[in-house]
Image (cartoon, helix red, strand yellow):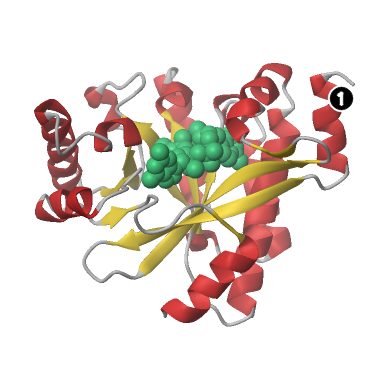
């Protein structure tokens, strides 16, 4: 089978699954949300990382049906947890550039919210800076999405095409500081300065901010000291299978 046919088959035969990585409020220690991260449970090759198939899915266009599946599955699961009495928390879903540029994205999001019954305030879409190359188009789409009542964050912030003059025009809620800046904050003064500055900037712009890839207590200490609200990373938890996250939600709050 070609990669394309294998991926098509994966989608049809339920080989794709979502893991969820919790996000934590630094001050209270509470879980404040979770990011949906796709995995491919391949019948021969075992668990395949999205790094090994998302780029291909993007190139072939299969990211469009795969992305729709991810969105629907994340909303379905979140609504189910809410119905079961778990804490009501937002789920964030990664939207690739190709998906962002589909003319029916907004209609699709609206339809998925409608059919799963998830309240829009519990859905957050993560877009990357590369989705905003055409600034005016991006602003139009973001305004339309915000109109639905969902949240928007900029993922991998700082690694892409970033023009601060455009950033202030985007109707977004949150920046996700890329893990490449967080990794060396304790040893690289430049990374420490970049992270501290992004946090300070978000405060002045009334945006939320979350640091990704937090792996150590020292990194957490630095972020706390610099008034970062939220963290995501192995220090708190790896991405978890749905049943594992459910256990964590049960014990946590
Ligand atoms: O979970 P992990 O660290 O293995 O993810 C690797 C990469 O794959 C990250 O860049 C992440 O944003 C991306 N990714 C994970 N799940 C999805 C998804 O559902 N859609 C898209 N477009 N990208 C995803
Ligand atoms: O591009 P995006 O930010 O969506 O990708 C998230 C990726 O980062 C996922 O593949 C996830 O598994 C990974 N990840 C999450 N927490 C950590 C961490 O603490 N350290 C490292 N190295 N990777 C992490
Ligand atoms: Mn992400
Ligand atoms: Na990221």
* Residue 43 falls in image quadrant: top right
Residue 144 visible in the current orientation = no
Quadrant of the image occupied by residue 128: top left
Instruction: Residue 81 in the image: state x and y as whole percent.
Output: 61, 72
Badge count: 1
- Identify the residue at image location x=63%, y=27%: 52
**Residue 186, position in %: x, y?**
15, 39
- In this view, the residue in front, 183 or 159, is 183
Does the Cβ of the disc 1 residue fall within 8 Å of ligand 1? no
Residue 141's place in the image compared with 18, above or below, is above
Quadrant of the snapshot with the C terminus: bottom left
Q: Is residue 63 visible?
A: yes
Horizontal side of 139 relative to 48 (left or right) equals: left
Query: Neighbour class for label 1 at 10 Å: few (<14), some, many (≥20)?
Result: few
- At a point 18% along the width and 43% down the height, the residue shown is 199
> What residue is rendered at 67% in x and 66% in y?
117
> Along the horizontal axis of the image, is 176 left or right of 112?
left
With respect to residue 194, does 203 lie above or below?
below
Q: Residue at x 64, y 78 (%)?
A: 83
Q: Nearer the viewer, residue 182 or 129?
A: 182
Residue 24 in percent (x, y) is at 34, 61
Of residue 228 and residue 104, the one placed in the foreground of this image is: 228
Residue 111: x %, y % from top left: 70, 51
Read off the residue under disc 1. 5
Lateral position of residue 109 relative to residue 219, left or right: right
The kind of secondary structure element at disc 1 is: helix
């Amino acid at each position: 089978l070609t990669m394309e046919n294998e991926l098509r088959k994966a989608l049809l035969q339920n080989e794709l699954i979502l893991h969820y990585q919790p996000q934590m409020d630094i001050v209270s220690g509470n879980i404040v949300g979770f990011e949906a991260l796709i995995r491919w449970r391949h019948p021969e090759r075992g668990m395949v990382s999205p790094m090994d198939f998302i780029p291909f899915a993007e190139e072939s266009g299969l990211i469009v049906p795969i992305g729709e599946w991810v969105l629907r599955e994340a909303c379905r699961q979140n609504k189910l947890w809410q119905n079961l009495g778990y804490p009501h928390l937002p789920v964030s879903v990664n939207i690739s550039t190709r998906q962002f540029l589909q003319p029916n994205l907004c209609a699709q999001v609206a339809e998925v919210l409608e059919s799963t019954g998830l309240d829009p305030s519990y859905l957050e879409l993560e877009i990357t800076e590369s989705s905003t190359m055409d600034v005016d188009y991006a602003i139009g789409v973001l305004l339309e999405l915000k109109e639905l009542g969902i949240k928007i964050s900029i993922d991998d912030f700082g690694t892409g095409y970033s023009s601060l003059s455009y950033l202030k025009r985007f109707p977004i809620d949150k920046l996700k500081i890329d893990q490449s800046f967080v990794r060396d904050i304790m040893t690289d003064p430049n990374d420490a300065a970049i992270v501290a500055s992004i946090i300070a900037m978000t405060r002045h712009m009334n945006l939320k901010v979350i640091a990704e890839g937090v792996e150590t207590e020292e990194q957490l200490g630095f972020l706390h000291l610099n008034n970062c609200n939220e963290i995501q990373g192995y220090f708190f938890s790896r991405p978890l299978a749905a049943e594992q996250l459910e256990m964590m939600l049960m014990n946590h709050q």
